[in-house]
């Protein structure tokens, strides 16, 4: 072993027995460069974070400028920090009305926790509802919403009660009753295997929530900021949720999350007791500066439209993979594409082979027969060609 790999295995807490283990020394555009001098096309964008690719000049410049001014100065919510205020105002201007208030956090899971707490306090109810296939993070309450029981079981008892619903199944919505404070849903499930619900289902979900006084929370942690061919995935469905949860690409490559809601909902956490929900680092000035630069770039360049166009081209190229024997389906929305294999072993081998072919892809947590592709929204058409050719070679190894 060379470089830091040995110490990686000795001192870094491992999250599985089979880490990808690439020793990344540099990342630029869509590419990762490893210590052994190889280049890998990052077809997962650091799991949905690097929507502008790596080392985008506008983001780096914003980080440099903010670092010259100040880093951390006081816990979030006390001082008026212009960079936080600018990002919150810009988000409020692009989120659907009446969502006009932003609570910044460090991560997606932390933002989910905040949204769940807010829903309990606003409604005075205790239960939450979530869907099969859901992934909302790994802290206790976020994990309680997890759709795959195998991931929940070792950590129970988890916060709840949680009412379990079936994704894209209108009849299952009958289980939403007056105990439920909020329904949490990914408008497109990524870890669930790239599942895209129908507008009718989403509209029925909105109707049921309204009828029963339940808040509707959209987890746009992965789908946000252009990934699905719209700035936010909610735009596909004609539905306005009560809260939107953001993270990943929100920080432009630095850690940042947020839960966003109308003032009348979010104001409940500012009193009884005051400081009942606080965070030291949430909304860090450096993350806000990077996030603001990234958002402005996405808006100025309409990157969601590019994601839609390039995503179509990618799906078209991959559609020839569908043979019913190894690949059951290719589906996607914008630059979030899933290749569904007929069995999990195929997905695993395909992933390994594709990485050997210098393209990083991964399979999904709650659907281990689906490989997920989510390249930067800035990915070049030549890079799409490169990836498709690499994946075709990987596919040819499946017997
Ligand atoms: C849809 C969704 N929600 C929440 C999370 C949790 O975000 P974080 O890892 O920042 O806690 C993730 C992470 O993958 C996610 O994909």
Image: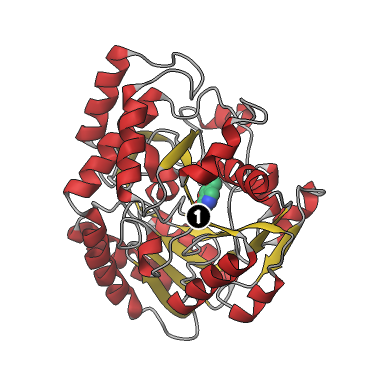
**Residue 242: percent from left, percent from top:** 50, 55
**Residue 322: percent from left, percent from top:** 41, 82
- Name the residue rendered at 58%, 27% in the picture: 278
Horizontally, is 10 left or right of 352 in the view?
right
Q: Pointer 1: what residue?
A: 242
**Residue 316: percent from left, percent from top:** 28, 76
- Name the residue rendered at 58%, 45% in the picture: 115
Q: Is residue 29 above or below residue 79?
A: below
- Asked if residue 350 can be seen in this view, the reply is no
Horizontally, is 228 left or right of 196 in the view?
left
Horizontally, is 183 left or right of 308 in the view?
right
Rendered image quadrant of residue 215: bottom right
- Asked if residue 367 can be seen in this view, the reply is yes
Secondary structure, mark 1, is loop
**Residue 155: percent from left, percent from top:** 78, 47
Q: Assess mark 1: CB under 8 A from ligand 1? A: no
């Amino acid at each position: 072993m060379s470089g830091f790999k040995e110490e990686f295995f000795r001192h870094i807490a491992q999250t599985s027995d089979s880490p990808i283990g690439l020793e990344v020394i540099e990342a630029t555009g869509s590419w990762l460069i490893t210590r052994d001098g190889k280049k890998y096309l990052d077809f997962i964008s650091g799991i949905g974070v690097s929507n502008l690719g790596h080392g985008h000049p506008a983001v780096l410049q914003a980080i440099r400028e903010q670092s010259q001014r100040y880093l951390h100065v006081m816990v979030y919510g006390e001082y008026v920090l212009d960079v936080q205020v600018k990002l919150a105002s810009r988000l409020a201007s692009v989120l659907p009305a009446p969502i006009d208030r932003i609570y910044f956090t460090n991560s997606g899971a932390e933002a989910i926790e905040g949204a769940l707490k807010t829903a309990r306090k606003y409604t005075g109810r205790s239960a939450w509802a979530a869907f099969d296939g859901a992934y909302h993070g790994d802290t206790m309450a976020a994990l309680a919403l997890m759709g795959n029981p195998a991931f929940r079981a070792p950590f129970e008892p988890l916060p709840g009660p949680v009412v379990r619903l079936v994704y894209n199944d209108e009849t299952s919505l009958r289980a939403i009753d007056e105990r439920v404070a909020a329904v949490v849903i990914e408008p497109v499930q990524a870890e669930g295997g790239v599942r895209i619900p129908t507008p009718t289902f989403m509209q029925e979900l909105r109707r049921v929530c309204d009828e029963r006084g339940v808040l509707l929370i959209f987890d746009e942690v992965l789908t946000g900021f252009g990934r699905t061919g719209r700035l936010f995935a909610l735009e596909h469905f004609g539905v306005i949720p009560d809260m939107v949860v953001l993270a990943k690409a929100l920080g432009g490559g630095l850690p940042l999350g947020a839960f966003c809601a109308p003032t009348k909902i979010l104001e409940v956490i500012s009193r009884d007791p005051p400081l009942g929900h606080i965070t030291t680092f949430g909304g860090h000035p450096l993350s806000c500066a990077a996030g603001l630069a990234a958002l402005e770039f996405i808006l100025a360049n309409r990157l969601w439209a590019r994601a839609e166009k390039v995503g179509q081209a990618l799906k078209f190229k991959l559609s020839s993979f569908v043979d019913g024997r190894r690949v059951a389906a290719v589906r996607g929305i914008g630059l979030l594409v899933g290749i569904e294999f007929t069995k999990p072993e195929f997905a695993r081998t395909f992933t390994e082979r594709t990485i050997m072919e210098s393209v990083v892809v991964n399979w999904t947590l709650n659907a281990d027969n689906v490989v997920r592709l989510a390249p930067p929204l800035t990915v070049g058409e030549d890079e799409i060609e490169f990836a498709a050719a690499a994946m075709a070679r990987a596919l040819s190894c499946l017997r």
